[in-house]
């Protein structure tokens, strides 16, 4: 992947992540707009000789610079709230993928089809094949069906971890003694990469997450 490619967000593989990307762009429009405007005004003030020493009030101007930012904030807040509630949506159908964080690997379980707990360790650098991603490949991938609701349940066996899969818009804390669940809907077949997202100790950087989305038929096989 090129340097510039790495600066982009990953391509969305779920409707939720597509919404998040749109919201990111929406927020950036506001952010870049405000930043440019303030920079412009700042420069203009630096380079002119106007003085405001004798000006005590400007009611109209003050009204405008109060109301306009308030409207801009509403313009930011409403889509943000919408996204928040969309994220909270979870369905009770579909399969459950249970992921447990350990120092320093993940283990997975799919109880509804009788997949017993298995460990997913990072592949060490000397063992990588050509084209593999360094620090991202694992020996046993978690598998989920695509175009179907999946619930991810996560917990931890030792310290805090976080299960994150950016391209499907899932990021969830793995807390010892507690189950967190989140809806996941992968709409395209593929292999998706993520990393533990809570500083969890010495090998925090070396417990990647790999999920493979396959068709329901292949999944059951
Ligand atoms: Cu961790």
Image (cartoon, rainbow, N blue to C red):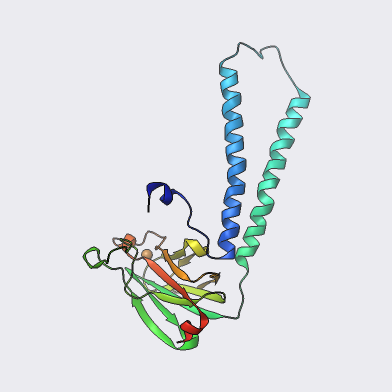
Q: Quadrant of residue 191?
A: bottom left
The count of marks equals 0
**Residue 57 appears at what percent x and percent y?**
74, 20
- Asked whether, in this view, residue 196 is left or right of residue 171, the answer is left
The residue lying furthest to the left in this view is 126
Residue 65 left/right relative to 137: right
Can the viewer see residue 178 in this picture? no
Question: Residue 4 at x, y = what percent?
Answer: 42, 47
Task: Residue lying at the far front in this picture: please name it.
Answer: 130
User: Is 17 drawn above or below residue 8 in the view shown?
Assistant: below
Quarter holding residue 20? bottom right
- In which quadrant of the rendered image does the C terminus lie? bottom left
Q: At 57% from the left edge and 80% from the top edge, which residue is drawn?
A: 94
- Regarding residue 111, the answer to whether it shows in the image is yes
Please state which of residues 33 and 103 is positioned toward the viewer in this rendering: 33
Instruction: Give the x, y percent position of residue 103.
Output: 32, 69
Q: Is residue 178 left or right of residue 18?
A: left
Quadrant location, ligand no. 1: bottom left
Vertical position of residue 95 compared to residue 72: above or below: below
Residue drawn 42% across the image and 86% down it: 115
For image coordinates 48% across by 53% down, the residue present is 9
Residue 65, percent across and down?
71, 31
Going by the picture, which residue comes out furthest to the right?
Answer: 60
Relative to 79, residue 114 above or below? below
Q: Residue at x 36, y 80 (%)?
A: 118
The N terminus is located in which quarter? bottom left
């Amino acid at each position: 992947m090129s340097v510039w490619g790495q600066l982009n967000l990953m391509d969305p593989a779920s409707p939720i992540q597509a919404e998040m990307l749109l919201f990111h762009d929406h927020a950036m429009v506001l952010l870049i707009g405000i930043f440019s405007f303030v920079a412009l005004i700042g420069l203009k003030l630096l380079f002119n000789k106007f003085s405001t020493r004798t000006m005590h009030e400007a009611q109209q101007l003050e009204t405008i610079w109060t109301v306009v930012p308030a409207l801009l904030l509403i313009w930011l807040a409403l889509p943000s709230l919408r996204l928040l509630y969309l994220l909270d949506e979870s369905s009770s159908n579909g399969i459950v993928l249970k992921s447990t964080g350990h120092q320093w690997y993940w283990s997975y379980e799919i109880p509804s089809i009788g997949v017993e707990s298995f460990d997913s360790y990072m592949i060490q650098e000397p063992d990588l094949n050509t084209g593999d991603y360094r620090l991202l490949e694992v020996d046993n991938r978690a598998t989920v069906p695509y175009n179907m609701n999946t619930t991810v349940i996560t917990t931890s066996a030792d310290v805090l971890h976080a299960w994150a899969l950016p391209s499907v818009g899932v990021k969830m804390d793995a807390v010892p003694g507690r189950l967190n669940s989140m809806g996941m809907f992968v709409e395209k077949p593929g292999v998706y990469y993520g990393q533990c997202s809570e500083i969890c100790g010495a090998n925090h950087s070396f417990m990647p997450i790999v999920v493979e989305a396959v068709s329901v038929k292949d999944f059951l096989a």
